[in-house]
Amino acid sequence: MANTDWKAKSKKLKKKYKALKAELELRIHDAAAAVALTTDAPTTKTKTNAVSPLAPKGGFPELPAIAGVEFASVAAGIKYKGRKDVMLVRLAPGTAVAGVFTKSSTRAACVLDCQAKLAMKVPAEAGAAIVVNSGNANAFTGALGQKSVDAVTGCVAKALGVPASRVFSSSTGVIGEPLPHDRITAAIPDLVAGLNTDAVKMAAQAIMTTDTFPKGASATIEGDGGPIHIAGIAKGSGMIAPDMATMLVYIFTDAKIAPAALQKMLSRNVDDTFNAITVDSDTSTSDALLLCATGQSPAAPLQGATAKAFEAALQGVMLDLAKQVTRDGEGATKLVEVRVTRAASDHDAHLIAMAIANSPLVKTAIAGEDANWGRVVMAIGKSGAQADRDKLAIRFGDLLVAEKGWRSPKYSEEAASAYMKQDELLISVDMGLGKAKKSVWTCDLTHAYIDINADYRS
Amino acid sequence: MANTDWKAKSKKLKKKYKALKAELELRIHDAAAAVALTTDAPTTKTKTNAVSPLAPKGGFPELPAIAGVEFASVAAGIKYKGRKDVMLVRLAPGTAVAGVFTKSSTRAACVLDCQAKLAMKVPAEAGAAIVVNSGNANAFTGALGQKSVDAVTGCVAKALGVPASRVFSSSTGVIGEPLPHDRITAAIPDLVAGLNTDAVKMAAQAIMTTDTFPKGASATIEGDGGPIHIAGIAKGSGMIAPDMATMLVYIFTDAKIAPAALQKMLSRNVDDTFNAITVDSDTSTSDALLLCATGQSPAAPLQGATAKAFEAALQGVMLDLAKQVTRDGEGATKLVEVRVTRAASDHDAHLIAMAIANSPLVKTAIAGEDANWGRVVMAIGKSGAQADRDKLAIRFGDLLVAEKGWRSPKYSEEAASAYMKQDELLISVDMGLGKAKKSVWTCDLTHAYIDINADYRS
């Protein structure tokens, strides 16, 4: 057959391929819609993605009600049709609020507003509220961005009788579009009327964008005089490479703790939880994590062993939510822990772990279930961290694949390939240099990531 | 239909999809093979990719013969079947050699060997040679790696009668597999017999891995007493984020210039050429660029205005080759220049340009022909460089899309979308802060990148 005929044939095939792909996507969409119809929540996205294969089995967990915290959500029509897209949280007087935020130099108006308000240190007795919308990030929206924040938080403040300086807001979605804040303020009466201590799952659904499942986690510890509860929700799926902060996360507890102590506890646990995950190395303009302590547990104020137990439980909830965000990484089919040990310094351990976790070549190899440890070597090499080729060892799960500057004599391609077929993988690198260690979590890079992101705005 | 039925159906469809994809790839392969059969070079890869749509029109350029430089290539069966995979270059006595290499801490044995040999400053009168294989990177191969380098360069030295300290080698391909160097040494007699001043195109083909076209560029300037020629070849397609060095590049000239001056000239032009491109943010273990000056032009030694003209021509050849590597970026369908102006410092300009050029979200948006300038804002924000939201301006081509902290009032979605349909795009960011500027070149992130890299070793 002539060259041009081959080309024509190959072009025709490409069209057929596209058609089949479109059909497949339609089927997946229908299947997801069918799944959604069997759940209690009618809040599926118009542009539904199939639920991540890495979603926690058993769906959204039972979260304990936190005394002093009420939730509500409504469909305000910000961008999505037919799903809830605004959540409101009312926090009882006496609630301590702590927060960490993105370090992006182009951060959104609502992030700047939250930071300014937390810095004011308004006494907790005033009460507080959180209002969050999905579908629009209100980022890079100029002076109008702050006006939108003022309109929304001012309206909530008036409706709930709390100072505007204690109303925190977040927006998540497309960047650079004006926020239609009138739609949110118009929905505030409905939100206030709907406030309920049990509505946390719907609130978690209302803050989703490209997320395929709502994320929640909780813990309960025994305090002095009664139980202390922690419950948190999160959203996040793409643009995930938090920089000393997070995506959108809201964690609530009934513990008694002063705002300054709460902030300190939050800040020192962020590096090993939310800052230890990456989906695509891209850092959002809107990352925000608020931790709210109502103090309404019957238990005594946190101190000593109880404070330690609380902090451990808090870190557990934070790590659980962070890993759920990675499990819902756009297009993810594998959850991967990258564990670096015996690095020369903490900084080096972080550099190496993130170089591996963000490498497109490592991530595509994982998607292809290819035990391509040579690319792990490449990522270590490019990280900028101290490395000695002959001292480092690489393991996939328990399988030693490389050591002493070369492929391990025990290496078995068969065993490595079999290991790569699992949903959850561990890549360990022992640098053989010092005592520093770091674990980070990432996911694979698949065709679905490109499908989701090549037409996100359309 | 029940949920499980849907799942079964969707699984079945996935299989069908994969089958169709496999068939498609086979057709594309056949079509490419058919194309190759009509050209003069029978050196197609077994696993052929369709030629990049961004390949220079007109194919491999006519390169001037450089007096004192001879090329040869053979099929040694390193990894690929039925294609040339080793090239040999003989450089006449008197040739000055300069080089820059990857800064990876896990760099390959041949890179370490080249660096050690250049540091010896062996007089140019001894003559020199370059031997390069594709299909195996001889990286992370322990002590055996250096033995392979010694075997190959020693064999070439003996056959050509030059000192082994003047035989430079490169290897490119899979990492962590032992290099079957016996296959290369067995082919040396054939290589030596085939040495020819006109065989540069076949040499360029012999060093290809996932490349879809051989890369060459040249320039000629008028020297004092005659013309001075420059001819260069390069390979590179994936694992492209050079760090103060390059992929594999060999540039030859008949200019008369001392080794130290040649090295200086090379080093100062790398940052704005090969270090200004990125395909996937991953840095190779094997990047190497050698620049060889035979001094056999009738023109006088380089100095004054001629030296300046020569350096400008050299930079042109380097940039041309660097852009060809980006044009052949794995899966690329768009060549994108990211141009940052008025940044606060050179360092900041580089950070911003690379943050945009490496962002998976920016690159998938470009693949989807989506004028998603919000993601450019995101990338600026995460870069770590100084930025003032209200001072920066973003342009796609000539279209002003964002300024003064928000979408430009002149912004037209229609015009921006039409612009994105072009093969070659310019994204400009005016930071409005200082005088520093930087241009880098990148490509889009497509499904084909994942196809190529999810099963590279298989």
Image (cartoon, coloured by chain):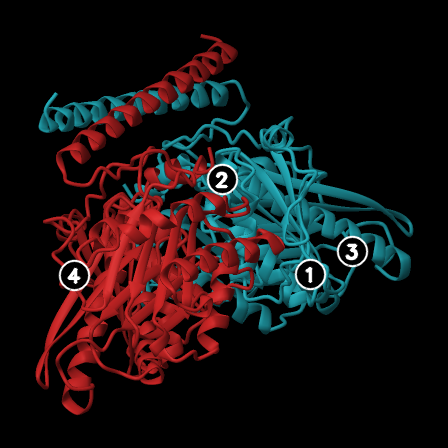
Chain colours: A cyan, B red
Check disc 3 and report the residue beneath it: A311
What residue is drawn where x is 24% and y is 36%? B50
Residue type highlighted by circle 4: Gly
> In which chain is the residue bearing label 2?
A
**Image position of A254 (left or right of B311):** right
CA–CA distance in space, label 1 to label 2: 35 Å
Residue B204 placement (x, y as % from top left): 26, 52
Residues marked 4 and 1, same chain: no
- The quadrant where residue B198 appears: bottom left
Amino acid residing under circle 3: Glu
Question: CB atoms at circles 1 and 2 under 8 Å apart?
Answer: no
Occupied quadrant, residue A219? top right
Describe the element under mark 4 as helix, strand or loop: loop
How many neighbours does mark 4 have within 10 angstroms: few (below 14), some (14-19), or many (20 or more)?
A: some
Which one is in front, B277 or B229? Answer: B229
Estimate the spatial distance between the alpha carbons at disc 3 and disc 4, rounded to whole Å: 52 Å
Q: Earlier in the sequence, mark 3 or mark 2?
A: 3
Residue identifier under label 4: B397
Query: Relative to B327, does residue A24 appear above or below in the rendering?
Result: above
* Image quadrant in which the C terminus of chain A is located: top left
Classify mark 2: residues with Cα within 10 Å, few (<14), some (14-19) or many (20+). many
Question: Which circle, 4 or 1, is nearer the viewer?
Answer: 4
Q: Is residue B247 visible?
A: no
Q: CA distance from mark 3 to mark 2?
A: 37 Å
The secondary element bearing badge 1 is classed as helix
Q: Position of residue B287 (x, y in %)?
A: 41, 60
Name the residue that disc number 1 marks. Answer: A266
Mark 2 and mark 4: Cα distance apart in space: 35 Å
Query: Which numbered mark, 1 or 2, is in the foreground of this view?
Result: 2
- Residue indicated by mark 2: A365
- At 32% across and 20% down in the image, what residue appears? B20
In terms of depth relative to the viewer, which is nearer, B274 or A24? B274
